[in-house]
Amino acid sequence: MKLRIIEIIFSIITFSGGAGAIGYGLFVFLGKKSIEHKFNESFEKYKSKLNALFSRISKIQEKEFEVLPEAWTLLVKAIGAIDQLVGLRLIANLDGLNDAQIEEIINTLKTPESEKDRLRKATNKTKVYDEIITRNNIGEARSAQAAFHNYIILNKIFLTEELHSNFDKIDKLLINAFVNVKMSEELKSQEQAIEAYRIVSDKIKPEINNIEKIIQNRLHYHEVN
């Protein structure tokens, strides 16, 4: 429509005897304005799309900065819980304590009252106490591992492929170690206990250093130290 108006104006100027140079100059001037207007419209649309893209990227990065520290915390807790099961444990010798001291220890246990009564009546209280502590630790290790496992699944979209691969690898190792611990308790198998220890010391702990470095790079840790 604008170009049609320009053609009409140019025809009028030419027909009325106006200088051709003036008509052509006006045509170029109005045409330039039209092009500039179109360019400005396109630029504004592009800038709007670019701002929306940067906004999405910024939100993803903000979420990543939220997810990574939590994933690391859950991983450390899961490893700590399984390490408590496979490492050297010191169990209190209840058989050498008096009734009042034993009762103090029983009251600290997170276990059903039926288990506490079993401990009170047991002839070998140290053995029963060890069983209760081990069972509690197994439950805590399972809960910690499940919390880490579920968190990684729910937040996979905010993890890089490299980081998710590393988290997935250590998650499988934690499950493997836990299964061996559980079997060693149920079957009273020293071999399974040793295998669980090897998984934690030889496979899981070395992976921790690698994951720590990747997370620090993602969080730009080196820029604030």
Image (cartoon, rainbow, N blue to C red):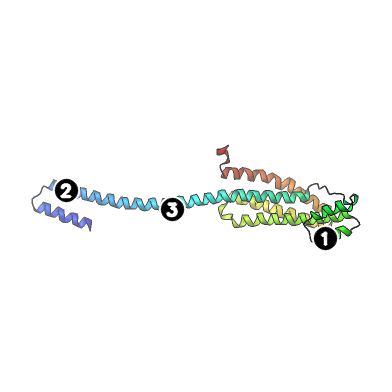
Q: Residue, x 80% and y 50% (percent of image)?
A: 194
Please state which amino acid type lies under the numbered disc 2. Answer: Tyr
**Quadrant housing the C terminus:** top right
Q: Position of residue 198 (x, y in %)?
A: 76, 48
Q: Mark 1 or 3, which is nearer the eye? A: 1
Give the alpha-carbon distance from disc 1 to disc 3, as whole Å: 60 Å
Q: Can residue 186 be seen at all in this image of the molecule? A: yes
Marking on residue 24: 2
Q: Earlier in the sequence, mark 2 or mark 3?
A: 2
Horizontally, residue 172 falls left or right of residue 88, namely: left
Q: Residue furthest left?
A: 17
Snapshot quadrant of residue 202: top right
Please state which amino acid type lies under the numbered disc 1. Answer: Glu
Give the alpha-carbon distance from disc 2 to disc 3, as whole Å: 42 Å
Q: Mark 2 or 3, which is nearer the eye? A: 3
**Quadrant housing the N terminus:** bottom left
Given residues 10 and 118, the one toward you in this image is 118
**Which residue is disc 3 drawn over?**
52
Marking on residue 115: 1
Q: Mark 1 or 2, which is nearer the eye? A: 1
Helix, strand or loop at disc 2? helix
Given residues 11 and 63, the one toward you in this image is 63
Q: Residue, x 12% and y 48% (percent of image)?
A: 20
Please state which amino acid type lies under the numbered disc 3. Answer: Ala
Horizontally, residue 128 falls left or right of residue 180, namely: right
Count residues near mark 1 (Cα–Cα under 10 Å), then give few for <14, some for 14-19, many for 20+.
some
